[in-house]
Image: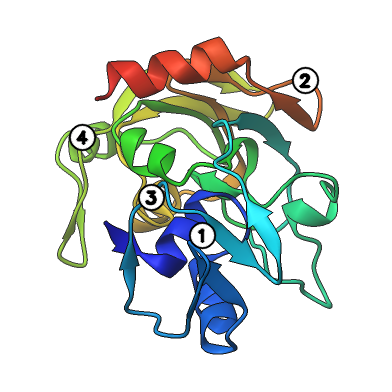
Amino acid sequence: MRKIAHVISLRGFCSRRFAEKLVLNEKVRVNGLLISNVAEKIDENSNIEINDFTLKVPQTRLWTINKPVKVLSSHKSQKEFKTIFDYLPDLPYTTYIGRLDYMSEGLMLLTNNPKLVNLMQKFERVYEVIIHEKPNKEFFKFCNNPIIDNIKYMPIICDKLYKYEKFWKLRLRLFEGKNREIRNICKYFQLKIIRLIRISYGPFNVPKILCKEVNFSIVNKILLDTL
């Protein structure tokens, strides 16, 4: 049993917050009964109608996204800035797995099943980071046990470092998704980031096009393997 807004969001119709507004405005019926209490818990397989439109239980879908730089990972429209969803108007309501900040680019994942977000939290993320100078030995030692402002991060693996044009390029492997983790560590060592690109997340690589849907058999395997 889950709260009604949560079940509506799991079906990919809208966010939980918007679903709560629909309930409070008496737009939602469950198994034919009008529901106006956002705390109401229902079975996930219940029949749900919103303004007489029946919400089907959808097949889980997943998309790989090649997020451009200077684009927000947000559902909220922004007057000054483009969001990734401005470029994907035909997608159903989705939630992101591993969002990227405004100046970062590369692989993001979108899904219509919020359960996947938690299931994929421990998957490895790989980033390429172009910085203005070569990091010192203390940087690599610090990455084994990074703590900044009392925030402890999981160990970060650097498996490549080489000269890139007039800069330096690092390849970093992370196993968590704390906010601005790489940027905070580079800032701590006064390393200026020129570009930050996520190239993979678990079994998925950044697509060559803006958006690519993942084959359902692969998505289903993730669901089964993480049970």
Residue pictured at 81% horizontal, 25% vertical: 209
**Mark 4: amino acid:** Pro
Q: Marks 3 and 1: in contact by CB < 8 Å?
A: no
Whole-angstrom CA distance, mark 1 to mark 3, is 9 Å
Whole-angstrom CA distance, mark 2 to mark 1, is 33 Å
Estimate the x, y position of residue 21 in percent, counting from the top left: 56, 83
Which of the pair 211/224 is nearer the observer?
224
Q: Marks 1 and 2: in contact by CB < 8 Å?
A: no
Whole-angstrom CA distance, mark 2 to mark 4, is 30 Å
Residue 8, numbered label? 1
Which of the pair 223/155 is nearer the observer?
223
The part of the image, by quadrant, that contains residue 66 is top right
Residue 54 can be seen, yes or no: yes
Residue pictured at 54% horizontal, 49% vertical: 11
Closest to the camera, between mark 2 and mark 4, is 2
The answer to whether residue 42 is above or below residue 208 is below
Residue 60, numbered label? none
**Mark 2 — residue?**
208
Taking 111 as reference, is 91 left or right? right
Q: Residue furthest front?
A: 32
**Mark 3: amino acid:** Glu
Closest to the camera, between mark 3 and mark 4, is 3
Q: Residues within 10 Å of mark 2 (few under 14, many from 20)?
A: few
Which of the pair 44/207 is nearer the observer?
44
First in residue order: circle 2 vs circle 3: 3
**Mark 2: amino acid:** Lys
Taking 93 as reference, is 199 left or right? left
**Mark 1: amino acid:** Ile
